[in-house]
Amino acid sequence: MSMLDLDKFRAVELQRDPFDFLCVPGFVKREYLEDLHRDYPRIDKPGSIPLGVFPQGPSFDRLIAELKGPELCKAFSEKFGLDLSSYPTMFTARGMCRATDGKIHPDSASKVITVLIYMNPPWEAAGGRLRILRSQNLEDYAAEVPPEEGTLMCFRRCDSSWHGHYPFEGQRRAIQMNWVKGSVYIWHEQWRHRVGAWAKGVFGGQSKGY
């Protein structure tokens, strides 16, 4: 049985304003959430962390394997009208958020599609809710997404794919998957994030956020 509700994904209409995106609450099926919370990487630092840096369990490994699978790639290709099978994928995870995270940005030009899967309890905080923006103004938003467990947010990267959130400090879990334009970019980003995780733990700093 799949952990992912691809039928629900296919049923949600792709939004075009201000750029191509969609949000799917319940994308990860509810019956798997408890195991995924248990097996989520034990990340105790802010920033995007490559998988394998912190311990993770079998349910989390199974989720990543499904996200890498051909059925999901086909569903996303059909949704965005773009053959993603030739693009490699890159994964990172977040566990902690600092007040300096969530800066507005459009994503790197090497990214094709960004996929976020949130893994948090019902979200009551005002901060930490991702906003899809029409400009570099957090109040000029088309959608706001609370980072609640099982929720998918994805978008096609472009020069104006602005997104960000108001400050939040504390645990905020998010799995990030990207289809990217080359494996060299993956190597560079994985190295950068590993060094960044160490540097933030030792020296502090800030990062963009999802």
Image (cartoon, rainbow, N blue to C red):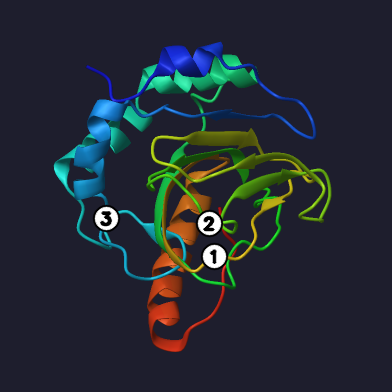
Label 1 close to label 3 by CB (< 8 Å): no
Q: Nearer the viewer, residue 192 or 32?
A: 32
Instruction: Give how far apart the Cα atoms at labels 2 and 3 are.
Output: 23 Å
Residue positioned 46% across, 73% down in the render: 196
Q: Which mark is residue 41?
A: 3
In the image, residue 91 sits, relative to residue 41, either above or below, namely above
Mark 2 or 3, closer to the camera = 2
Other residues around mark 3 within 10 Å, as few (<14) / some (14–19) / many (≥20): many
Q: Secondary structure at mark 3?
A: loop
At which x and y percent is residue 8? Answer: 46, 16
Instruction: Give how far apart the Cα atoms at labels 1 and 3 are.
Output: 20 Å
Q: Which mark is residue 168?
A: 1
Quadrant where the N terminus lies?
A: top left
Instruction: Give how far apart the Cα atoms at labels 1 and 2 are.
Output: 8 Å
Residue positioned 17% across, 47% down in the render: 57
Amino acid carrying label 3: it is: Pro
User: Is residue 64 shown left or right of residue 15?
Assistant: left
Q: Which mark is residue 203?
A: none
Q: Which residue is mark 2?
A: 125
The answer to which quarter of the image holds residue 190 is bottom left
Q: Earlier in the sequence, mark 1 or mark 3?
A: 3
Q: Secondary structure at mark 2?
A: loop
In the image, residue 138 sits, relative to residue 2, either above or below, namely below
